[in-house]
Amino acid sequence: MPPLDDDHTGARIKEQRRLARLTQRQLAVRLPYSYSYLNQVECGARPATAAFVAACAKALNVDVTILTGQPYLTDLQRDRLAELVRPIRESLDLYDLGPDADLTVRTPERLVAEADRMCAEVRAARLRNVARELPDLIAELTHTAWSSPSTRLWQALASAYRTAHDITVKLGYYDLSSVALDRMAWAAERASDPCLGAVRQYMRALVYFREGEYRIGRRLVAAGHSAVGQAGESREALAVTGQLHLGASVISARAEDEGAVMLHIAEARRIATLIGDASDVHWLSFGPANVALHEMSAAVEMRQYDDALKQAKEIRLPAHMATSRRAHFLIDRARTEMEVGHTESALKSLTEARRLAPEQTRYHPAARETISGLVHLSRRTPETLHHMAAWIGL
């Protein structure tokens, strides 16, 4: 079995456990996992699932990022992405300063189009390009929305804040992503757009999903349903409602509430059947294909790996599906294949995810954990896996 350095999730769990003055058995008592599982993760013999990391973070009273090691600063600095994050942070702090007399801005029409384009760029997993261009767009939209307030400008600014959230989440800057969501709410209120407000609640729910606070996540989904209920029965409102159900399905799966999972998936599927593909609505990718992807993700979260793999093999992704969503599916599939012992298939899925969305895959915690797990399962590390491990910094 190839050696693993001390910079992995299990080692960080072990360090935080010791800081909390807990033995492995004492921590295991606080977890919905066995002592044996904890022992294997800590020594690096088994990768840590997102659910396991969230449970440990909650039991140890630390942020999930402390255990995952995010943001992966060494890699980010080497890739010169960290220097792109600071301007985003600064642009998010302009929201209440009013117009900037020294700023040269594009026309409102161009700014609105640019906000839409950047959402598309994130979906295409071009993170570096968006991170570079986004701060100027936010500054210009902030100035213009204050100078000539209009619903579409506030909507565009809310969309730009949402893009800032998407970028910072994918790079592991969760503190900054929360600031971006607060700004999104601020702009959505000025736009008087209940659907945007509901989308923001959906994204907040996923924050608590990552942190293992499933009760709060469910309450936020309920708040999203209340918000979108003000928008009537439009196609937009139905798509957002369906996406809220999909978010609730994975939260329920992580909470091991299989009955709730089935109810939310069924309701999302009913809406998807009614309105068809609505991936253009707020860039949510909602539609029949995304329902199938969430059903599979829920099975993964509930550790029903045989069922998840069966579903994965039956999924046919439409040609128009966003690159970022395709890569996410491949990462989920790789984890499932590894868990059922199909290591070669898992490596192929990760290789394809890397080809499609290299930046997203490199900084995705599940991809990194799966690569780590494959290294430990391999008696001899294949050249492709060796390159993958070196690529993420193992």
Image (cartoon, helix red, strand yellow):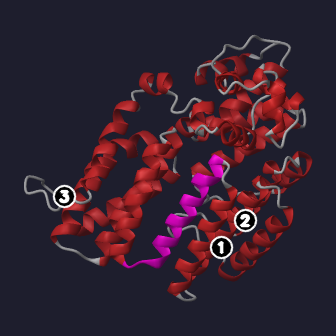
SS at mark 2? helix
Residue positioned 32% across, 46% down in the render: 133
Question: Which one is earlier in the sequence, the residue at label 1 or at label 2?
Answer: 1
Main SS, magenta residues: helix
Residue positioned 46% across, 51% down in the render: 178
The answer to whether marks 1 and 2 mark residues whose Cβ atoms lie closer than 8 Å is yes
**Above or below 204: residue 49:** above
SS at mark 1? helix
Label 3 to label 2, Cα distance in Å?
41 Å
Q: Quadrant of residue 49?
A: top right
Label 1 to label 2, Cα distance in Å?
9 Å
Closer-to-camera residue (34/311):
34
On whether residue 191 falls in the magenta region, the answer is no
Asked if residue 393 lies left or right of residue 91, the reply is: right
Question: Which one is earlier in the sequence, the residue at label 3 or at label 1?
Answer: 3
Q: Which residue is mark 2?
A: 291
Closer-to-camera residue (96/287):
96
Where is residue 209 drawn, in percent x and y?
A: 65, 53
Q: Which residue is mark 3?
A: 97
Tell me, for residue 242, which label it has, or none.
1
